[in-house]
Amino acid sequence: MKRCIQLGRMGFPAASPNPAVGCIIECDGQVIGEGYTQAFGGPHAEVMALSSVKNQDVLSKATIYVSLEPCSHYGKTPPCVNRILESGIPRVVVGILDPNPQVAGQGIHRLLEAGRQVHVGVLEEEIRSELRFFLTAQEQKRPYTVLKWAQSADGFIAPLASTRTEKTPVWLTNRAARQRVHQYRTEIQSILIGWKTAEEDQAQLTARDWAGPSPRRILIDPQGKTSPHSPIFDQSAPTTLFVNQGMTYAALAPIEVEQIRGSVNELPKQVAGYLHRKQCNSLLVEGGAFTLSTYLHSGQWDEIRLFRSPVELGDGVAAPQFKADFIRQEAIGNNQLEFYKNTQNSFLI
Ligand SMILES: NC(=O)c1ccc[n+]([C@@H]2O[C@H](COP(=O)([O-])OP(=O)(O)OC[C@H]3O[C@@H](n4cnc5c(N)ncnc54)[C@H](OP(=O)(O)O)[C@@H]3O)[C@@H](O)[C@H]2O)c1
């Protein structure tokens, strides 16, 4: 199953919003086939692994291991359960059940009904952590939400606006750390900032420094203060603007405009519902301090990725305060990247 987890990673993030599942076929103690879920809409891991077996005759005495329950419904591809049954493979080992209501135990049921030997529940914690974007979307009907910021050694995320002479980002992190952020942007399906960050940093929010698609950009600008010429409206990635009711933005087409319905603290939930309807299973909140704090207060977040820099600013916009469970840390040159999880959302290990 560890190998299934490794294989699944090879399909991430291309498989999104499908789960990046891995699969192996074993016979007489030897791995005879491997596969992982292909880019969204492509074949699933089980089909890839079964097709990779050179001598199909030995499948009648083989075992298939797969990190997620095989699907039993027609989606973009036919049900994997059908392919497993056709192969004649007698034993199936499954990491975790698929909470998707179209599967939810029915894949296992069909295998058992057909007389296959099935074992469910191997490395469950590890797999739930790996598939946390997909599982959050399925179980909680909202995107898995990562809060990310960089802070100076003395606890600021930026100089005070009044002391800034140019509208350009003030970098606290090193080049490799900034590249890591661009990698995250290709892995997470949407990215969100408040209008002050859009204006002061002239933020573009695209993945320019890493190969892969840019996420959908979400801009929170209740009173429409962002210039229409801001890079965030440059049409290089799908973009949605959240504004107060009654404001119109015909000039910004094809930017999508959503009307804010509730209070500041209710907005994270509204954004989550909007993204869920768009099948976005993950959201990266990149700031600034006010926006991050509203997410922290709302409880509508899962993970924090905090870059600590050795730079001192002396004064500035204070970094958000938070309580969370520390998971791990990693050095990126002279920067420190720390991972935390929300105690209420226990996917990450
Ligand atoms: N170091 C880092 O990682 C990092 C990352 C990003 C930004 N920054 C820095 O952060 C600074 C900006 O931070 P900031 O805290 O001043 O501003 P911000 O969070 O970028 O934007 C705040 C504004 O966005 C709107 N907003 C955000 N969330 C909202 C919600 N839930 N409901 C309603 N409105 C909401 C409000 O607009 P209204 O006031 O119009 O209602 C609010 O005043 C910049 O200097 C930028 O350089 C640093």
Image: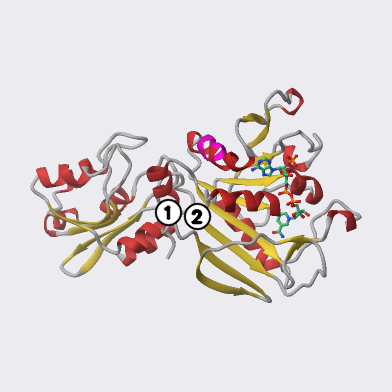
Q: Is residue 60 magenta?
A: no
Decide: is 62 above or below 299.
below
**Residue 101, quarter of picture:** top left
In the image shown, does 66 or 274 lie closer to the viewer? Answer: 274
- Comparing 343 with 234, the one in front is 343
Q: Secondary structure at mark 2?
A: loop
Which amino acid, mark 2? Asp
* In-image side of 31 versus 179 (left or right): left
Q: Which mark is residue 132?
A: 1
Please tell me the numbered disc located at residue 302.
Answer: 2
Q: Which kind of residue does numbered mark 1 sit on? A: Arg
Image check: 67 left or right of 12?
left
Disc 1, SS: helix
Image location of residue 173, percent across then percent down:
72, 67
What is the quadrant of the C terminus in the image?
bottom left
What's drawn in magenta, residue-wise? 270-274
Q: Quadrant of residue 102?
A: top left
CA–CA distance in space, label 2 to label 1: 10 Å
